Image (cartoon, rainbow, N blue to C red):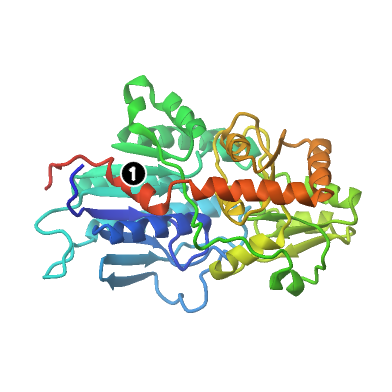
Amino acid sequence: MSTGARRLIVLCPHFSPDIAPTGKVMTDIVMQWVALGHEVHVVTALPWYRDHQVEPGWGGKLVRYERTPWGSITRIHPFPAKSKANLLFRAVAFVAFSVIAGVRAVAVRRHTGPDARVQHRGVDAVVAMSPPLTLGTVGWLVARLRRTRFIFNVQDVFPDAAIATGAVRNKLIIALASWLERFTYRRASAVVVLSPDLQRNVRNKIGAKLAERVHVIENFVDVAGITPQDRLTPYRRELGIGTEVVVMYAGNVGFSQSLELLVEFARRTPQVTVLINGAGVASASLRARAADVANVRFGAYQPEARLAEVLATGDIHVVSLRAGLASVSVPSKTYSILAASRCVVAAVDRGTEIDRLVTRAGAGICVAPDDVDALCTALGSLAGDPARRLALGSAGRTYVEQHPTARDVAGAYVRLLPDSLSNS
């Protein structure tokens, strides 16, 4: 690989200060590209993830443009739906956002003048993140118009996850999304996925001739920013939780996670507090199910600066996906839990990436998905064994300290580019 500076265009649905996990991932990668001397132009959405509406102070404009010392950031209104369950509106919103993002990406102009990082060259690559799938297709079009390479970053395989959860049942929509998915994969110069499971999934869809285009680049964790803390956190006090054992689920509260099993665990184990920390389409139904269970608490998303504190609040963390989903999705929060030196109970398909990660790290217990008795047994055993919890948490922290960093991941993306490009 050439060590020269590159010019990159990034299309992603979230970027700092948005708190979405994928926004954190892409922000950190971009900042590492910047530190390595590359010029980056980000096209993203206005911050909206926390409450699924544009955050205060960011409204009033369809598009906001910011020139930075290292490139630029263009933020576009995401047209958020009031309810994530409104799939038609969300689909239309994704398309509208993606189209506007594509137009803005085509219009991106390079830095000029003495502070320009890349001299006398066009764009070296367009990097687009999915979901939404439409952003990948638009990324390919932008790359075609800019006469450059297209790198497709796939965080979750869509529409597989939506089909598995029953969120999408219309056969015409499924057929259209599946065709668009394969169309985009086959036109990418490189497809980046998070695990060998996702790699097999994508390779099976594009055929043996193009299989080598699909690369595994794992997500990373900020072990300097997420450090072990005392379990009796200020956040615990804010929620009115005492010194009892806390079983925590932190993240998106959707229908993919089988979180009703945690409510059942709380019914069976009244001496333990179950804390559901996050929001999502399943929040209302989960709150209703837990209305008569006194030891179930709910918390909201917190600023990124409090992430280590929030994670420390839980003595045991749960990572769960319904059966069939662990081969198309890799919850990146697992790495953050390990960095916080907390043990994990993973209710996921056996032999998939999270199962392998927890086993390799020696950081917890893995059980079959959607099995309430197995989950309750695993959680109960750890709730009654503080020494084992500490040992598992320590092992997880040790493991992620050896894991690739954001700079390693950023470098891996750049290595996908050839030394010379047609538009150099």
Residue appearing at x 32%, y 48% in the figure: 411
x and y, in percent, of residue 80 in the image: 52, 62
Give SS at disc 1. Answer: helix
Residue appearing at x 37%, y 48% in the figure: 408
Task: Examine the image and state in which quarter residue 60 appears.
Answer: bottom left
Which residue lies under the disc numbered 1? 412
Residue appearing at x 52%, y 56% in the figure: 21
In this view, the residue farthest toward the top is: 208
Q: Residues within 10 Å of mark 1 (few under 14, many from 20)?
A: some
Task: Examine the image and state in which quarter residue 285 appears.
Answer: bottom right
Q: Is residue 130 above or below residue 371?
A: below
Judging depth in this view, the residue of 87 and 320 nearest the camera is: 320
Judging depth in this view, the residue of 227 and 351 nearest the camera is: 227
On screen, residue 384 versus residue 254, left or right, reads right
x and y, in percent, of residue 239 in the image: 76, 71
On screen, residue 411 versus residue 301, left or right, reads left
In this view, the residue farthest toward the bottom is: 57
Q: Is residue 211 above or below residue 84?
A: above
x and y, in percent, of residue 160 in the image: 55, 35
User: Can you say which quadrant of the picture contains the N terminus?
Assistant: top left
Look at label 1 and name its amino acid. Ala
Question: Residue 229: in sight, yes or no?
Answer: yes
Task: Examine the image and state in which quarter residue 136 appears.
Answer: top left
Question: Residue 317: in sight, yes or no?
Answer: no
Judging depth in this view, the residue of 69 and 404 nearest the camera is: 404
Q: Is residue 407 above or below residue 163?
A: below
On screen, residue 336 versus residue 58, left or right, reads right
Q: Count how many numbered circles sit on residues in the image.
A: 1
x and y, in percent, of residue 311 in the image: 65, 60
